Image (spheres, rainbow, N blue to C red):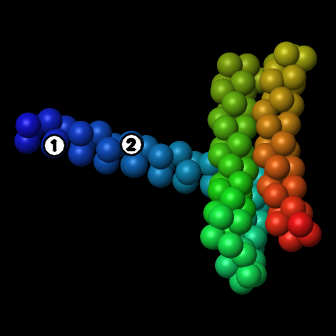
């Protein structure tokens, strides 16, 4: 049992390390991630400064994180497409555009949530 727990702890540590390495790689190479992080930091401060319910605050913060998740996935998809080939191909453009659209949809969802919370 101790060996099993030790192995699981090591797996968790590896997972955390690899995730941090992925974040650092995206941070270093993706201006969009840095921009969305700055926007989310500002909105997080605003979410705590405003008189919101805990549920409203949680929703707004979570949707901000969803935007960052979408941006990370977008960056990963773009990197994979570029790794396969740097040739211009309409299929590659379509793939990249769809990944970018996912980021936009996540941002729209966050914006709508802010609108509903502030106006409604």
Image vertical order of residue 106 relative to residue 114, above or below: above
The residue furthest left is 2
- Write the residue at 68% across / 49% down: 66
Quarter-of-image position of residue 56:
bottom right
Q: Is 5 on the left-hand or right-hand side of 26?
A: left
Quarter-of-image position of residue 60:
bottom right
Is residue 101 or residue 97 the one in the foreground?
A: 101
- Write the residue at 87% across / 55% down: 112
Quarter-of-image position of residue 52:
bottom right
Quarter the N terminus occupies: top left
- Write the residue at 14% across / 35% down: 4
Q: CA distance from mark 2 to mark 1?
A: 14 Å
Q: Secondary structure at mark 2?
A: helix
Give the image location of residue 117, x and y in percent: 82, 66
The disc label shown at residue 34, or none: none
Is residue 101 or residue 23 the one in the foreground?
A: 101
Mark 2 vs mark 1: which is more N-terminal? Answer: 1
Q: Secondary structure at mark 1?
A: helix
Image vertical order of residue 79 relative to residue 12, above or below: above
Instruction: Identify the residue under disc 2.
Output: 15
Give the image location of residue 116, x and y in percent: 87, 62
The disc label shown at residue 6, or none: 1
Q: Is 98 on the left-hand or right-hand side of 15?
A: right
Is residue 19 or residue 105 the one in the foreground?
A: 105
Give the image location of residue 59, x and y in percent: 69, 59
């Amino acid at each position: 049992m101790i060996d099993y727990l030790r192995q699981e702890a090591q797996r968790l540590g590896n997972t955390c390390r690899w995730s941090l390495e992925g974040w650092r790689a995206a941070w270093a190479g993706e201006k969009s991630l840095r921009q969305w992080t700055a926007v989310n930091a500002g909105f997080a401060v605003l979410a705590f400064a405003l008189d919101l319910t805990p549920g409203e605050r949680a929703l707004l913060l979570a949707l901000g994180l969803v935007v960052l998740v979408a941006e990370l996935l977008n960056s990963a998809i773009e990197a994979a497409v570029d790794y396969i080939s740097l040739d211009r191909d309409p299929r590659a453009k379509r793939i990249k555009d769809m990944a970018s659209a996912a980021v936009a949809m996540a941002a729209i969802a966050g914006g709508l949530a802010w609108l509903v919370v502030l106006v409604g």
